[in-house]
Image: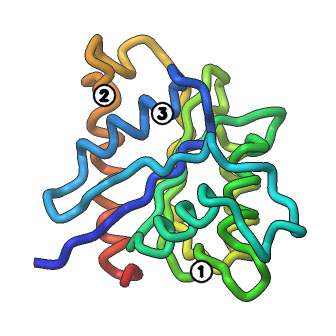
């Protein structure tokens, strides 16, 4: 049986982030041949092209983890109708220097949860634009623009009954996507 390593990138540094909770919860829905790991991003310096020659250890670790992954899941909040700066920083670090793009060819899925009625629709669209340029095949359907509501998570932080079916459907499609396009 093949084994698939999935790198989960949460676009928030907040300890009690709804998106971190979502990332943790959906990882539990993957089949046994999938291993999910949230990639640490809080220790990355701001991207500076001057540092490409001697990248920080945290940048080397990031690129190694992304390169080793068979697939990616981005779970992001929406800040000012776009992606958070910390997520853009991660994308820049792992795609640079030019010609050393660790993201290239990795099949990805995008999720996000917000208190707003449109969920993270704009952030997800902006992220899709960036990922297209970075040569990341991104699952188009089903989309998941999630609005945080009572019952989304249970008292243990797992998906509540009202969310579980929707998220299991998303994970099932993502698994198919990775098996089709992942290495």
**Rendering coords of residue 180 (x, y %):** 34, 81
Evaluate if marks 1 and 2 touch, with contact meaning CB atoms under 8 Å apart.
no
Residue at 48% of width from left, 33% of height from top? 20
Asked if residue 2 lies left or right of residue 136, the reply is left
* Residue 122 shows in the view: no
Quadrant of the rendering where the C terminus is positioned: bottom left
**Is residue 75 visible from the viewing direction of this image?**
yes
Give the labeled residue for mark 1: 104
Residue 55: x and y in percent read 71, 66
Name, please, the residue furthest toward the left.
Answer: 1
Mark 1 Cα shell of 10 Å, populated few (<14), some (14-19), many (≥20):
some
- Residue 63 rendering spot, x and y as whole percentages: 57, 68
Q: Does 83 sit above or below residue 50?
A: above
User: Which residue is located at x 37 percent, y 52 percent?
Assistant: 37
Q: Distance of mark 1 from mark 2, alpha carbons?
A: 31 Å
The answer to which quarter of the image holds residue 123 is top right
The residue to which callout 3 is attached is: 20
Q: Residues within 10 Å of mark 3 (few under 14, many from 20)?
A: many
Question: Which residue is located at x 48 percent, y 16 percent?
Answer: 149
Of callouts 3 and 1, which one flags the residue occurring earlier in the amino acid sequence? Answer: 3
Residue 42 lies in quadrant: top right
Label 2: which secondary element: loop
* x and y, in percent, of residue 124 in the image: 66, 50
Residues at marks 3 and 1, CA–CA distance in whole angstroms: 24 Å
Element type at mark 3? helix
Mark 2, Cα crowd under 10 Å, few <14 / some 14-19 / many 20+, is many
Disc ID at residue 148: none
User: In the rendered image, which residue does mark 2 sit on?
Assistant: 159
Q: CA distance from mark 3 to mark 2?
A: 12 Å
- Name the secondary structure under disc 1: loop
Q: Earlier in the sequence, mark 3 or mark 2?
A: 3
> Pointers 3 and 2 in contact (CB under 8 A)?
no
């Amino acid at each position: 049986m093949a084994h698939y390593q999935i790198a989960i990138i949460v676009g928030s540094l907040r300890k009690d982030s709804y998106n971190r909770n979502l990332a943790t919860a959906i990882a539990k829905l993957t089949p046994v041949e999938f291993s999910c790991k949230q990639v640490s991003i809080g220790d990355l310096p701001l991207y500076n092209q001057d540092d490409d020659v001697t990248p920080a250890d945290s940048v080397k670790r990031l690129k190694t983890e992304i390169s080793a992954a068979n697939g990616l899941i981005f779970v992001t909040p929406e800040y000012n109708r776009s992606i958070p700066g910390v997520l853009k920083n991660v994308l820049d670090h792992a795609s640079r220097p030019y010609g050393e793009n660790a993201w290239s060819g990795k099949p990805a899925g995008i999720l996000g949860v917000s208190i707003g009625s449109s969920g993270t629709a704009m952030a997800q669209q902006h992220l899709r634009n960036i990922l297209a340029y970075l040569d990341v095949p991104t699952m188009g359907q089903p989309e998941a623009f999630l609005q945080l509501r009572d019952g989304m998570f249970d008292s243990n932080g797992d998906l509540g009954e009202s969310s579980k079916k929707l998220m299991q459907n998303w994970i099932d499609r993502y698994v198919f996507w990775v098996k089709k396009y992942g290495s």
